[in-house]
Image (cartoon, rainbow, N blue to C red):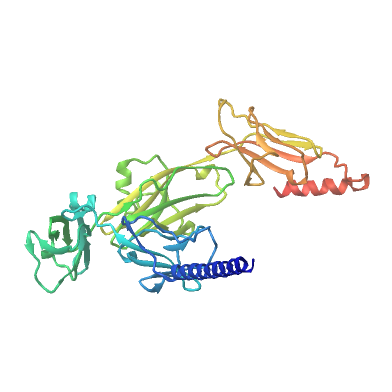
Amino acid sequence: MLQPRIQNMSSFLVSKQLWFLLVIAAVATITQAGTTKSNVTVMTIMPGGVAKLPCTLEGGMYFNRIWLKNGIRVKLDRHRKINKKGSLVIRSFDRNDKGIYVCKTNKGRIIQRILLRYYKGIKGRPLFRRFQSEVIRVRVSVVNKRVKFECKAEGTDPLSYHWLKDGKPLSGRKYKADLCKLRIKNLVESDAGTYTCVASNVYGNSLCSYRLLVVKNPVIKPSLQPGFPKNTPKNVGENASMECFDLFSSQMVHFRWLMWLTKPNKTLEKDVYKLISNNNYTRYFELVNPSHYESLRKDVGNRFLSGVRMNLYNVTKKNQGYYSCVMCHRGGCAVNTANLTVFQYNGTTTVMKIKPGKTAKMPCIMNGLKHFEPNWLKDGKRVEMGWKRKINRKKLLVIKSFESSDVGLYVCKSHSGRIIHKTILQYKDHPSCPRSAKLICACRLDLHTSAM
C-alpha cells in the first residue's frame, strides 16, 4: 500500500517540474519575440501622393509612438503628422521622403519597419510635363537684365541634362547651367534665340524649349485691366467709387479721372491726351479733382497691380454720367470708361406702428416688375433672414415677435441698388411703459427715427 503512494507522489513532482519548465520557456519566448527585429515592409509611393505608415500592437493597445527615419527622429509638421489611428501620414511625397522608417514605443521596443521607395515610373526615356514638352514658351526680357529657364523631367535614373542654343552647345562664362536650370546674366541682343534642354537616360532623351526675345529700349503702350472701372448704380445721398488698375507697364505712369459732358466714343477716347495737353477739353469733359483719388495695390497671385480709386461722396443727379480712367506714359495712353447711374427716390416713407409681440409685414412693390429679388436694409445694414425675419411669396418682409431691437428704418432695394420703398417701424403703446412714461418712450422713438 505504501509503494503506490510513493509512486504517485513522485509522478506529481515530476509533472509539477515539467509545468514550471514550460512556463519559463514561454516567458523566454515572449521576451525574445519582443526584442527580435521585425520584418521590413516595402512601400512604393507616387510623387505627390500620400503615404500612410501603420504602427499598431496586437489587441489595439494604446502606446506612445516614436518614429525614426534613417535613425533620426521624425519632426512632425504640416507635411508629416500622426493620425488618430497612430499611423504616420506623409503628404506631397517627394524624393526627400524616401528611406527606412522605424516605429518604436517609448521604452525602445521596435513595432514596425517600413522602407519607403520613390516611384520612378515605367522604364523608358525621360518625360517633361505636357506644357513644357509640346509648347515652346516665349520669354521677353530687357537688355542688362537676367533670365532663368527651368525644365524638370521625370524618368528612370540616372538622368543627365545639357542645354543647347539654336541647336548648338552653350559656351561661355555668362551661361550657368545647373542640371535642369539655366541662368543668363547681363542680357544683350545677341542672347536672343531658342534655348533647348535635353534630358537623357539609358532609354532615350526628351526636349524642352524656350524662345527668348531681348529688347533694347522697350516702349510698350500702357494697358488697363479689362472690366475696370465698372458700371456703378447708386442712390442720391450715397457714396460712389470706381477703380482702375495698370495691367502691365515698364514705365512711370500717370493716372487721371475725367467726367464726360457728352457720351464718349472711340475717337474722343483716343484724343484724350491731346485734348488735355492743348487745354481744348472743356466742351467734352471735366477733370476730377485729385483730392478724390486714392492709390491702390491689388494682389493677383504672382504679382501686384497698382491702381487708383475715385471716391464721390453724397452723390446727386449732377454726378450721373460717364467717367473714364486715363493712364499715360511716354508710350501712349490707355482709357477705360464706365457709367455712374444715380437713382432718386420719389416715393413716400411709410410709418408703421406695431405692438410688442405682434407680426410686422412691410411691402416692396416695383412697378412693371412682378418677379425680382428685393434686398432689405435696416439702418443701412443688410437684414439677416431667419425664423424671425423672412420674405414671403408676396415679397413682403415679415418680422415675428416685434421687439425693441426691430425698431428702425427699413429700406427695400432692387438688385441694381435702386431704392423701391422706405418704412419706419415704431412701437405702438408699449405695455411696459406706464402712462406717466409714455412721453419718454415716444421721445426715445422720435430721437431714434430722426437719427436715421
Q: In this view, does 126 lie above or below 376?
A: below
Front residue of 225 and 205:
205
Q: Position of residue 203 (x, y in %)?
A: 13, 56
Judge from the rendering whether residue 176 lies leftward or rightward of residue 234; answer left or right.
left
| Residue at horizontal 39 percent and vertical 51 percent from the top | 325
Q: Is residue 161 above or below residue 373?
A: below
Front residue of 174 and 443:
174
Instruction: Tell me the quarter of the picture where residue 171 sits.
Output: bottom left
In the image, farthest residue toward the front: 1
Front residue of 111 and 450:
111
Q: Where is residue 214 in the image (x, y as percent from the top left)?
A: 17, 61
Q: In which quarter of the image is the N terminus?
A: bottom right
Q: Is residue 43 above or below residue 405?
A: below
In the image, farthest residue toward the left: 168
Instruction: Tell me the quarter of the picture where residue 202 sits.
Output: bottom left
Judge from the rendering whether residue 379 lies leftward or rightward of residue 99; answer left or right.
right
Judge from the rendering whether residue 383 lies leftward or rightward of residue 107; answer left or right.
right
Instruction: Tell me the quarter of the picture where residue 235 sits.
Output: top right
| Residue at horizontal 40 percent and vertical 68 percent from the top | 102
